[in-house]
Amino acid sequence: MAEREFAPGRIFLQPAGIVLEGRPTQVRTVLGSCVAVTMRAPRLGRAAMVHCLLPRAAAAAGSMPEAEALRYVDTAIELMLTAFARIGVVPAEIETKLFGGADRIHRGNPNHGYRVGRRNIEAALEVLRGRGIVPAVLEVGGRNGRVIDFDTATGLVMVRRLPCDAAGESL
């Protein structure tokens, strides 16, 4: 299961999960190299949040099971936009925010390794910009993980950075 309600009106969003809400809900997730994208259509009072692990899928969103598509930034964003389009919301009226994408320092060399956090950010921005969407908020990169709390009713997102040690490991 990608989400679980931990109190009335409060959901914890797991990795590779999505929340689509039409009622006021508090959604929390914890990010390291993963990214979370929030989208809100104020006109209809609808909001969504996704927690993605990896930048790009090998196939299009419609050609794989939704559970698999949600693992990837590119296909998860497309699923969100499709869900909004089904209820008559166009990209121009969606308030979008992007969070996460931390990269720890590997062996003292910031250029060592795959840098999945940076790649997740790049994939998200590429897909969003390709659909004419400029995020209203970018809280991305760095070495620290983040706790994200999203209020679907107002669109407000509270971010708490997690501490990390000198090697970039979350504590």
Image: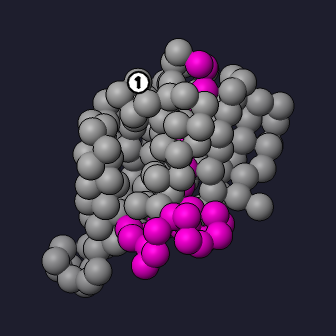
Q: Nearer the viewer, residue 35 or 47?
A: 47
Residue 140 percent coordinates (x, y): 31, 49
Classify residue 87 by image quadrant. top right
- Residue 11 vs residue 158: left or right? right
Indicate the amino acid at tag 1: Glu
Q: Which residues are magenta?
A: 44-72
Residue 58 percent coordinates (x, y): 43, 79
Q: Is residue 102 visible?
A: no
Residue at label 1?
A: 93
Label 1's element?
A: helix
Reply above or below: 61 against 152.
Answer: below
Q: Nearer the viewer, residue 25 or 149?
A: 25
Tell me the colour scheme of the image. Answer: one colour
Outermost residue to the top: 43
On the rendered image, what quadrant is the N terminus found in? bottom right
Reply above or below: 83 against 61.
Answer: above
Classify residue 6 by image quadrant. top right
Reply above or below: 17 against 89.
Answer: below
Few, some or many residues within 10 Å of mark 1 (<14, 14–19, 20+): few
Reply above or below: 60 against 127.
Answer: below
Residue at 41% x, 24% y is: 93
Inspect the magenta stretch and tell me whether residue 64 lies in it. yes
Inspect the magenta stretch and tell me whether residue 28 lies in it. no
Q: Nearer the viewer, residue 82 or 21?
A: 82
Residue 133 percent coordinates (x, y): 30, 37
Residue at 48% x, 43% y is: 81
Residue 158 percent coordinates (x, y): 48, 32
Q: Is residue 71 visible?
A: yes
Residue at 62% x, 50% y is: 18
Classify residue 24 by image quadrant. top right
